[in-house]
Image: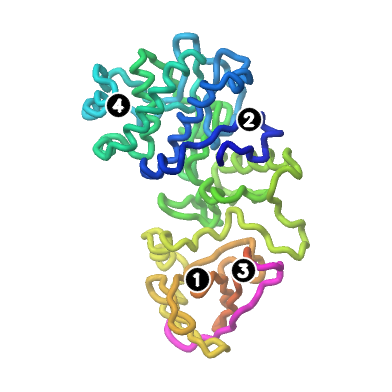
């Protein structure tokens, strides 16, 4: 932020440059990825920063890349090397957009690449950088372009058009990186990990606790997704994936834990020691309570169809000792305390231990977030475990069934 160090520069030699002004990002639909070409532009414009680069070639990576093998220099002075993206194959219907920025160009001249991962000579990067930034800014402010070029990768299209416009063609490597997830095919993981140089953890590892992979647009009972850690880094250590998860999931957890362990006290978040009076920090469990997911077809509706506990509780009413009534509706809606509304659903979370056992635990998010242990005809409602000050659950209500349900 503002070109300030992030605290890890002692471990990873780094240079920091200011981001594009907030007004520019806002005027381009909050597309923060525009800072990639902008940061390269600033690097190449600064003799002081360039002095830190001692090679004629550079490797351009993203922050969600794990190096799996030593990477040979696949580039030459005339030909960069890049990963081939299946969604970056240009076609004739895009020519009118390409020619807006490169009048004499066409889709036939574009390589199916982006700016990362990329091995390239510095002179070539200098030539591309201004156009890469300008074309990306133009594409992102052109609403018509999104009809034929996916909005979320328009900066990649900016690079592809820019490199073609100065006459560059890339060597493309299908196995430069791997982008696995819980639903990876056996073919993708054949030869893993030695087959690939880079692990790009852009896709999620969503599993049920029995190791069954979840379908797309599902949050797993075990959920390893970089997006959970946008606001704060993951705590060390991460738990292993469920038995039966694929080898890419185990590799990624192992890589995270290896890196966090190596940083020692420099890593900012660690789980409390076993037996500590402090509650655990949330990492990969308990993520299924998000409202959008509960309303998705793969959310509460699937739980109702597949989970015996949810089938048993749906439509039930509960009389609580404080005089309030808790209702667990048939579509995942809940009502409690003066009729306030919220959501409920399954909460199979090993972090909760015996306080809210797997298979006998739900969440009820009304007037705050709560975990609820189900014991026959009684409920024990507890404040959300991760936000308490103690490892001892804070009970906020006890309720008994008064009607409804199976």
Q: Quadrant of residue 258?
A: top right
Could you tell which of marks 1 and 3 lies nearer the N-terminus?
A: 3
Distance from Cα at disc 3 to Cα at disc 2: 45 Å
Whether pointer 4 and pointer 3 mark residues with C-beta atoms closer than 8 Å, the reply is: no
Which quadrant is the N terminus positioned in? top right
For mark 1, what is the residue?
365
| Residue 281 inside the magenta-drawn segment | no
Asked if disc 3 and disc 2 are in contact, CB closer than 8 Å, the reply is no
Specify whether residue 394 is painted magenta: yes
Residue designated by label 3: 357
Q: Nearer the viewer, mark 4 or mark 3?
A: 4
| Nearest to viewer (mark 2 / mark 1) | 2
Residue at the location (58% across, 53% down)? Answer: 284
Q: How far apart are marks 4 and 3 (CA)?
A: 52 Å
- Residue mark closest to the camera, 2 vs 4: 2
Marks 4/1: CA–CA distance: 46 Å
Q: Earlier in the sequence, mark 2 or mark 1?
A: 2
Above or below residue 163? Residue 384 is below
- The magenta segment is 388-406
Q: Name the residue under label 2.
A: 14
Comes first in the chain, label 2 or label 4: 2
**According to the image, label 4 marks what residue?**
90
Tell whether 376 sits left or right of 314: right
Horizontally, residue 296 falls left or right of residue 195, namely left
Q: Distance between the residues labelled 1 and 3?
A: 18 Å
């Amino acid at each position: 932020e503002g070109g300030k160090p992030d605290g890890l520069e002692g471990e990873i030699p780094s240079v920091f440059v200011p981001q594009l002004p907030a007004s520019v990002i806002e005027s381009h639909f909050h597309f923060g990825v525009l800072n990639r070409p902008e940061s390269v532009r600033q690097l190449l414009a600064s003799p002081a920063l360039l002095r830190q680069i001692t090679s004629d070639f550079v490797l351009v990576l993203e922050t969600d890349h794990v190096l799996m093998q030593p990477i040979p220099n696949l580039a030459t002075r005339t030909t960069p090397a890049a990963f081939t993206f299946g969604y970056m194959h240009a076609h004739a219907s895009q020519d009118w957009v390409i020619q807006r920025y490169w009048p004499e160009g066409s889709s036939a001249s574009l390589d199916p690449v982006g700016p990362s991962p990329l091995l390239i000579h510095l002179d070539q990067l200098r030539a591309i950088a201004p156009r890469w930034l300008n074309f990306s800014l133009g594409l992102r402010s052109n609403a018509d372009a999104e009809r034929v070029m996916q909005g979320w990768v328009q900066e990649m299209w900016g690079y592809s058009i820019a490199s073609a416009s100065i006459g560059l063609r890339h060597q493309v490597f299908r196995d430069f990186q791997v982008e696995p997830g819980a639903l990876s095919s056996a073919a993708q993981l054949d030869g893993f990990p030695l087959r690939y140089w880079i692990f790009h953890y852009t896709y999620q590892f969503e599993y049920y606790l029995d190791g069954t992979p979840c379908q797309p647009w599902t949050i797993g009972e075990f959920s390893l997704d970089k997006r959970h850690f946008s606001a704060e880094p993951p705590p060390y250590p991460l738990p292993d994936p469920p038995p039966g998860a694929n080898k890419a999931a185990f590799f990624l957890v192992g890589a995270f834990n290896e890196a966090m362990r190596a940083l020692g006290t420099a890593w900012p978040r660690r789980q409390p020691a076993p037996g500590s009076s402090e509650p655990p920090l949330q990492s990969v469990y308990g993520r299924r309570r998000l409202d959008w997911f509960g309303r998705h077809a793969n959310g509460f509706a699937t739980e109702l169809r597949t989970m015996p506990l949810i089938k048993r509780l749906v439509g039930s009413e509960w009389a609580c000792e404080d005089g309030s009534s808790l209702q667990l509706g048939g579509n995942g809606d809940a009502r409690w305390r003066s009729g306030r509304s919220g959501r409920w659903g399954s909460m199979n979370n090993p972090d909760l231990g015996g306080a809210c056992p797997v298979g006998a635990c739900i969440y009820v998010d009304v007037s705050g977030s709560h975990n609820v242990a189900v014991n026959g005809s009684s409920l024990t409602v507890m404040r959300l475990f991760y936000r308490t000050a103690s490892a001892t659950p804070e009970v906020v209500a006890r309720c008994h069934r008064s009607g409804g349900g199976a």
